[in-house]
Amino acid sequence: AQSVAQPEDQVNVAEGNPLTVKCTYSVSGNPYLFWYVQYPNRGLQFLLKYITGDNLVKGSYGFEAEFNKSQTSFHLKKPSALVSDSALYFCAAWNSGYALNFGKGTSLLVTP
Amino acid sequence: EAGVAQSPRYKIIEKRQSVAFWCNPISGHATLYWYQQILGQGPKLLIQFQNNGVVDDSQLPKDRFSAERLKGVDSTLKIQPAKLEDSAVYLCASSLVRRAYEQYFGPGTRLTVT
């Protein structure tokens, strides 16, 4: 069985400061890991993925994520937050042949 | 290329009524997924199709939910009769068979059951 945990319901950060949204996973084998963003009344938009290779993955809109196998984590990061980054963020894992398994989501609020 | 299309975007019904949602995947995507996203939770898979065959429907409440993809393209998800706990956003996604991890999502249908 696989599971994804997002321990924070909400993350608050001031504009211009770095942000981190946490994710840990429990997946057998080699995990495929993803971050999606959801704006109000919109579908899920893909941000980035880790499949193999470099542990630091760069994605859309200046976001990046660090894969840490020993800590089974895949935290989402951005060096300088924008107000427009305020949204709901989902971490997800994929096992071959099955659907995405999502965490419960973390609401990011960036204040001016 | 056009994205995943869904309709309607919003629907309000009373409990015990029926409702249907429609999804048109990205052209060429043989795999289609229906997810249910309850407020405060992540999306949860309801059913997965490959062409017009069902790959996984283990989490579909079959006493009230049904889905079909007759020609291997468009899909319809139906709820009959609806319960209050069915209030959620219903997301449709599609992917290529060989890149099933790369799923593209539609805007979703927000269902409110009163």
Image (cartoon, coloured by chain):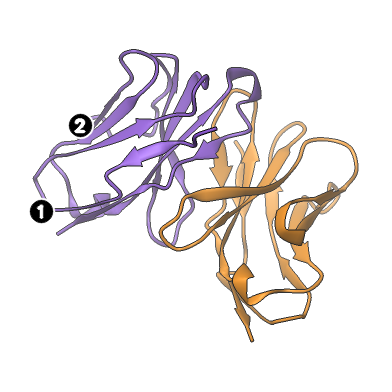
Looking at marks 2 and 1 on the same chain, the residue that comes earlier in the sequence is marked by 1
Tell me, what hue is chain A? orange
Classify residue A33 by image quadrant: top right
Question: In the image, is residue A21 above or below residue A72?
Answer: below
Chain ID at mark 1: B
Q: Which mark is residue B63?
A: 2
Chain letter corresponding to the colour purple = B
Few, some or many C-alpha atoms within 10 Å of disc 1 (few <14, some 14-19, many ≥20)? some
Q: Residue furthest bottom?
A: A112
Name the outermost residue toward the right. A54
Asked if labels 1 and 2 touch by Cβ distance under 8 angstroms, the answer is no
Establish if A9 lies above or below A91.
Answer: below
In this orientation, which residue lies closer to the viewer: B95 or B43?
A: B95
Find disc 1 in the rendering and name its residue: B14
Q: Position of residue B12 (x, y in %)?
A: 17, 55
Element marked by disc 2: loop
The amino acid sitting under disc 1 is: Glu
Three-letter code for the amino acid on which mark 2 is drawn: Asp
- Residue at point 78% right, 36% down? A51
Local secondary structure at mark 1 = loop
Q: Quadrant of residue B70?
A: top left
- Residue B106 is left or right of residue A102, and the answer is left
Residue B28 visible in this rendered orientation of the protein = yes
Pinpoint residue B99: horizontal percent, then vertical percent.
Answer: 65, 24
**For residue B8, which quarter of the picture?**
top left
Q: Residue at x 67, y 45 (%)?
A: A34
Q: Is residue B17 left or right of residue B23?
A: left
What residue do we see at 60% from left, 36% from top?
A1
